[in-house]
Amino acid sequence: MSTTNAQTEWKLAELAAAVGVSPRTVRYYVQRGLLPAPPFRGPDTVYGEEHRVRLKAIRVLQARFLPLDAIQAELARLSPEALRELADAALPTALLPPPVASEPEAPPAVSLPGASGGRTAAKGYQRWELAPGLELHLSDSADEKTRALAERMRALIEQAEGR
């Protein structure tokens, strides 16, 4: 099968690659109800045009920073024509992650102003889950004042949750 716009049926991996998500994401969206389940045909299961359009629409709505629950409500509200228009909208590429790659790439080092006025490269970030759905990312090159602020935020949330 080719991956042209005239194509109307895709295997899972083909559909995922055409839209820029992983096959696991497609399966998850079916499980969550964002996508209808494809007709099961074992290893010959194929996804149709409706799946492709809905996946593209989901990506556009994600670019608008909507959570999956809001995206699901929006998809249910839209007519098939409005859904297709949404799917055909230009994606703001700066807001979306790049298409799924086979191997994860290391993030590029970020050049930050150093204390002496020179530039230093940020090596990475610490990730703290402050609460379900709330994360704090602290650069390894953050100064002491910023680190103290991050520690205070974490302590306040832990205190509020009674941890």
Image (tube, rainbow, N blue to C red):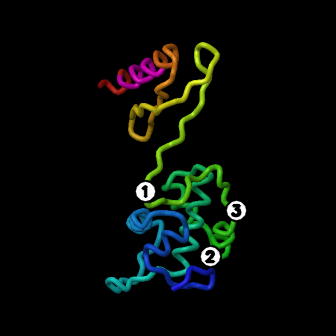
Q: What residue type is labelled 1?
A: Glu
Residue at mark 3 to residue at mark 2: CA–CA distance: 18 Å
Residue at mark 1 to residue at mark 2: CA–CA distance: 36 Å
Is 5 in front, or is 34? Answer: 5
Q: What residue type is labelled 3?
A: Ala
| Residue 103: mark | 1
Q: In this view, does 154 lie to the left or right of 89?
A: left
Residue at mark 3 to residue at mark 1: CA–CA distance: 27 Å
Is 151 in front, or is 79? Answer: 151
Residue 5: x, y in percent? Answer: 63, 80
Name the residue beneath numbered marker 2: 80
In primary-sequence order, the first of circles 3 and 1 is 3
Residue 163: x, y in percent? Answer: 29, 25
Is 79 in front, or is 32? Answer: 32
In primary-sequence order, the first of circles 1 and 2 is 2
- Dividing the picture into quadrants, the one containing residue 111 is top right
Name the residue beneath numbered marker 3: 90
Query: Could you tell me which secondary element the residue under label 2 belongs to?
Result: helix
Query: Could you tell me which secondary element the residue under label 1 belongs to?
Result: loop
Frontmost of labels 3 and 1 is 1
* Looking at the image, residue 16 lies above or below residue 105: below
Frontmost of labels 1 and 2 is 1
The residue stretch that appears in magenta = 150-158
Frontmost of labels 3 and 2 is 3
Q: What residue type is labelled 2?
A: Pro
* Looking at the image, residue 98 lies above or below residue 148: below
Q: Which residue is drawn at 48% across and 75% down?
A: 14
- Dividing the picture into quadrants, the one containing residue 31 is bottom left
